Image (cartoon, rainbow, N blue to C red):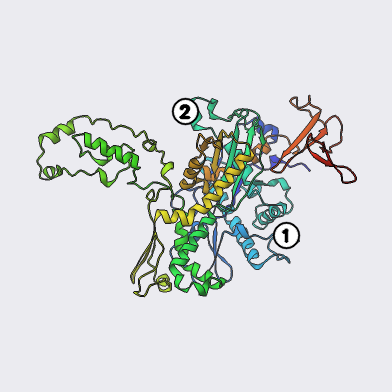
């Protein structure tokens, strides 16, 4: 039976993430596809008023807290706040990152029944996922009911259809598990048509969003109409999330159209390449560093003891949860950072200017940066402090400051600081502070014979009976926590660009990890404009972490605005653009060789015939003798 879109007036997109999740929705009205095509494209509305979050944010943490009987106590930001405040007790169960360890097989009935291949840990993660989906769904429905623009629309759960995002590398069984989760959480029922819940991979969803996003640089330059994709543009989607980084390269076969979301056509040049180098691996590295600092003296007793390690990890949970925020700003320049080239220019300019005591904020040729070198030794401020203003001071204030020359050695004054991001003094230190007595009592630091803490270069600790401070230098954080994960991501990009034969015109960096300043700046450094592996325009925005969520909703909306179409080649083409062709050729270009097959479109046969002979290809006859084609 065909799916009745006119039975559902709303569509909700759920972006289930490893560390953060979110939802958005659109009001489509109970209309048929034909009626929907004749209406204005619906607006996408984000749920931003998540419980216990002071600011309006697109996502909430993917964390649950249970009591000893596994009754849900807190979820989302409420759970994170509970951890940060040190209220977690021995009887509490903190379940997080449960997306990464879900079952790999399905029970005959229901989603939470254990099968032979399902571990107890996977079962708990499944239960946590179901509870989490139930909570975010209920909150989303409440948000829709409370929204001003839908006050006159009656919101019923039965009127909603859904789109859920999953990692690109998930197989059909894992996707089916998410469908079971949705049933157990009350989103859909066993009797519902399967199209009431669509499952889309995160990479494709992010692609749908990016393809409709203009290139602001091209808009400013006027080099492309509306900055949208043009025919033959080759573009790459880098969806950097919590658990994975997924990449794909496409080539547009037609021009984008802001007003017609169905008009865009693309050809995928490379397959998705998921690799476990997302931000959750930064979290693991940070946890290893903190465990070694805080409990290093007893490391031999816990490094191979899972239960003991989990107990100690719970003590430093406030620190690891602080890092969830700290990592999003790592790679930003500290306020007093000034490149050497700009510093030299400043000194030279000050030396040639009699007014050498210009305020540092005005004296910087590099924007709003400042440093101690800009302070003046003239001592002229003493007269002002006494209320006496000399003639030179008065004339200086009444005169127009002479413009400071721009440093030609860099673009720092224009906000381009990526070339300096790997300098040891570029960013601020990362500081962790413990004041809770329970945690302080558990600390076991390595110490020398003088009872002084033993630490690595770049690590400073201060401790007394009331507090314990850990200070990690920018260099230490870069080398010990970030670089391995970032390097893996860059290598993934490099291989994908080579596979697509370069000539990328734009790269979209999306996903929660895609907002990392350090990741963005390292990518710009690794693939500069004069490189054959140039990434083109690197496009980000403040909605990058919602790209998959919004793209999934676009997928659901577009599907309801057109008649159902097959994803495979059909025997007879009715489209005027393709009816003049009688042969379909499929070319698979791989690392180790190329294969080619074709199909005769003039017949009703749907089989593909492989072309086994190429000029220069080695073949073998029936006797195993080698022949050269």
Please say whether residue 487 is visible from this viewpoint.
yes
Which one is in front in this view, the residue at disc 1 or the one at disc 2? Answer: 2
Question: Mark 1, residues whose alpha carbon is within 10 Å: few (<14), some, or many (≥20)?
Answer: some
Along the horizontal axis of the image, is 613 left or right of 334? right
Q: Residue at x 69, y 46 (%)?
A: 196
Residue 416 marker: none
Q: Position of residue 386 (x, y in %)?
A: 10, 45
Please say whether residue 90 is visible from this viewpoint.
no
Q: Position of residue 449 (x, y in %)?
A: 36, 75
Q: Position of residue 36 (x, y in %)?
A: 66, 34
Q: Residue at x 80, y 30 (%)?
A: 583
Along the horizontal axis of the image, is 535 left or right of 451? right
Give the answer, above or below, for where 583 lies relative to 339. above
Q: Residue at x 51, y 75 (%)?
A: 301
Q: Tell me where residue 406 sits by quadrant.
A: top left
Along the horizontal axis of the image, is 453 left or right of 597? left
Taking depth in this image into account, of 244 and 162 the one nearest to the observer is: 244
Read off the residue under disc 1: 106
| Residue at disc 1, secondary structure | loop
Give the answer, above or below, for where 64 lies relative to 493. below
Q: Tell me where residue 322 sits by quadrant.
A: bottom left
Along the horizontal axis of the image, is 371 left or right of 86? left
Read off the residue under disc 2: 220
Quarter of the image with the N terminus is top right
How many numbered marks are there? 2
Give the CA distance from mark 1 to mark 2.
52 Å
Q: Position of residue 35 (x, y in %)?
A: 68, 32
Quarter of the image with the C terminus is top right
Q: Do labels 1 and 2 touch, CB within 8 Å? A: no
**Who comes first in sequence, dot 1 or dot 2?**
1
| Residue at disc 2, secondary structure | helix
């Amino acid at each position: 039976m065909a799916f009745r879109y006119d039975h559902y007036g709303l569509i909700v997109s759920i972006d289930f993430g490893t560390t953060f999740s979110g939802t958005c929705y659109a009001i489509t009205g109970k209309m048929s596809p034909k009626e929907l095509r004749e209406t204005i494209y619906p607006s996408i509305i984000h749920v931003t008023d998540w419980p216990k979050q002071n600011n309006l944010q697109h996502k909430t943490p993917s964390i649950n807290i249970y009591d000893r009987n596994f009754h849900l106590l807190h979820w989302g930001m409420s759970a994170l706040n509970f951890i940060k405040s040190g209220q977690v007790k021995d009887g509490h169960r903190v379940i997080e990152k449960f997306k990464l360890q879900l079952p790999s097989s399905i029970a005959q009935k229901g989603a939470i029944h254990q099968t032979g291949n399902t571990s107890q840990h996977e079962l708990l993660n499944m239960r946590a996922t179901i509870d989490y989906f139930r909570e975010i769904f209920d909150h989303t429905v409440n948000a829709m009911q409370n929204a001003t623009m839908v006050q006159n629309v009656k919101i019923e759960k039965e009127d909603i259809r859904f789109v859920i995002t999953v990692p690109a590398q998930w197989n059909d069984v894992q996707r089916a598990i998410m469908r079971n989760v949705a049933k157990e959480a009350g989103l859909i029922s066993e009797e519902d048509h399967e199209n009431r819940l669509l499952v889309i991979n995160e990479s494709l969803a992010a692609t749908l969003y990016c393809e409709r996003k203009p290139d602001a640089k091209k808009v400013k330059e006027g080099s492309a109409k509306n900055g949208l994709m043009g025919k033959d543009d080759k573009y790459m989607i880098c969806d950097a999330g919590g658990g994975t980084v997924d990449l794909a390269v496409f080539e547009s076969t037609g021009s984008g159209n802001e007003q017609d979301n169905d008009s865009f056509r693309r050809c995928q040049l490379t397959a998705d390449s998921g690799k476990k180098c997302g931000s959750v691996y930064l979290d693991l590295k940070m946890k290893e560093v903190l465990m070694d600092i805080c409990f290093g003296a007893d490391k031999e007793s816990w490094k191979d003891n899972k239960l003991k390690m989990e107990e100690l990890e719970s003590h430093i949970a406030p620190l690891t949860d602080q890092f969830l925020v700290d990592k999003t700003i790592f790679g930003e320049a500290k306020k007093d950072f000034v490149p050497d080239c700009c510093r030299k220019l400043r000194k030279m300019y000050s030396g040639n200017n009699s007014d050498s005591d210009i305020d540092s904020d005005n004296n910087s040729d590099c924007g709003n940066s400042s440093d101690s070198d800009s302070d003046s030794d003239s001592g002229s401020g003493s007269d002002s402090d006494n209320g006496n203003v000399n003639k030179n001071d008065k004339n200086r204030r009444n005169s127009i400051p002479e413009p400071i020359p721009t440093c030609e050695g860099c673009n720092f004054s224009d906000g381009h600081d990526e070339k300096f991001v790997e300098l040891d003094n570029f960013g601020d230190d990362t500081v962790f502070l413990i004041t809770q007595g329970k945690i302080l009592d558990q600390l076991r630091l390595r110490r020398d014979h003088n009872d002084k803490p033993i630490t690595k270069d770049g690590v400073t600790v201060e401790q007394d009976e009331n507090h314990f401070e850990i200070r990690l230098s920018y260099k230490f954080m870069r080398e010990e926590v970030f670089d391995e994960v970032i390097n893996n991501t860059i290598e993934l990009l490099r291989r994908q660009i080579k596979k697509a034969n370069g000539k990328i015109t734009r790269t979209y960096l999306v996903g929660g990890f895609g907002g990392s300043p350090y990741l963005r700046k390292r990518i710009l450094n690794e693939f500069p404009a004069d490189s054959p592996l140039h990434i083109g325009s690197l496009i980000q925005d403040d909605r990058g972490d919602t790209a998959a969520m919004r793209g999934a909703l676009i997928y659901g909306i577009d599907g309801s605005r057109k008649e159902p179409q097959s994803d495979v080649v059909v025997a007879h083409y009715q489209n005027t653009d393709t009816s003049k062709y009688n042969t379909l050729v499929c070319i698979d270009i791989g690392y180790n060789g190329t294969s080619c097959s074709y199909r005769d479109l003039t017949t009703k046969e749907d089989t593909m015939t492989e072309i086994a002979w190429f000029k220069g290809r080695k073949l073998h006859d029936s006797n195993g003798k080698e022949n050269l084609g």
